Amino acid sequence: MEYKISELVAKTQVPKSTILYYIREGLLPKAKKIKSNVHRYSDEHVELIHYIKYMKEEIGSTNEQIKFALQNQNQSFSSSATMLQPLMNTLSAIPSDAEHFTKEEFIKHFHVDVGLLEELLNDGIVLPVNQDDYTDREASIIKLVTYFKEVGVDYSILKAYVHHAKAMSELEYQMQTQLCSVRNDKNFSTLWKIMFESLFNAKTYIFNRNTYQVLLNAVKNEIRQ
């Protein structure tokens, strides 16, 4: 279908000024020009506006990250990396204003025990995003391990977390592969919604609700006793 700008605004709930801004920034294709001052927009504009809105509001992606994904959308679900590129900062769980350190700087700044750090790196408990790029997120994990050591409790639960996290990552990759296999121009927007909602909403919901149920059952058992 073709839409006037007023119809596009009504359909997407995005202001005209914002839509025109997206076009100027290269996030949206230019409208079809019927004649002077008469332009028409398509269903593609509707889907892309929904995509952009979702990425900005729910994921916090920048214009450049979104533009990269859109420019590569034909490859996005036939290869793994491009579709998730706007999500990488979010998946890394590193704030945009985080202070970064080399490994040597990190050890000195946080007074890290080198032997413990190497042990946690080998166990996959400490996972710097890049080989020589550390932040206070890594420091917080090391501090957690020291708390375990202080009370004389083995931190095997963290090792178990790593094991299950790897298994979950493999499942997520399998899901993406399945999405790739059915991708076409019509279902593209639905496929990325499945991927993003699974990564950022369903996973947290399922894990936290299961933790809640286990703890609730434990409380009930204590009360019965």
Image: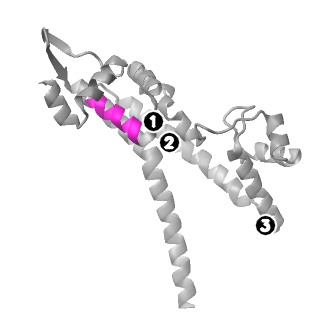
- The question of residue 49 being in magenta is answered with yes
Q: Nearer the viewer, residue 139 or 222?
A: 139
Which label's residue is closer to the chain start, 1 or 3? Answer: 3
Q: Are marks 1 and 3 in contact (CB under 8 Å)?
A: no
Give the side of residue 193 with respect to residue 164, left or right: left
Q: Nearer the viewer, residue 99 or 128?
A: 99
Please name the amino acid that badge 1 sits on: Gln
- Identify the residue shown where x is 51% and y is 58%: 207
Residue 153 image label? 3
| Residue 78 in view, yes or no | no
Please name the amino acid that badge 3 sits on: Val
Q: Looking at the rendering, which quadrant does residue 156 occupy? A: bottom right
* Secondary structure found at label 2: helix
Which label's residue is closer to the chain start, 3 or 2? Answer: 3
Give the side of residue 82 with respect to residue 103, left or right: left
Residue 139 image label? none
Q: Are marks 2 and 1 in contact (CB under 8 Å)?
A: yes
Q: Which residue is mark 2?
A: 172
Image height check: is 124 above or below 65? below
Give the side of residue 148 with respect to residue 57, left or right: right
- Label 3 Cα crowd, 10 Å radius (few <14 / some 14-19 / many 20+): few
The residue range painted magenta reads 47-57
Q: Which residue is mark 1?
A: 176
- The question of residue 17 being in magenta is answered with no
CA gap between label 1 and label 3 equals: 38 Å
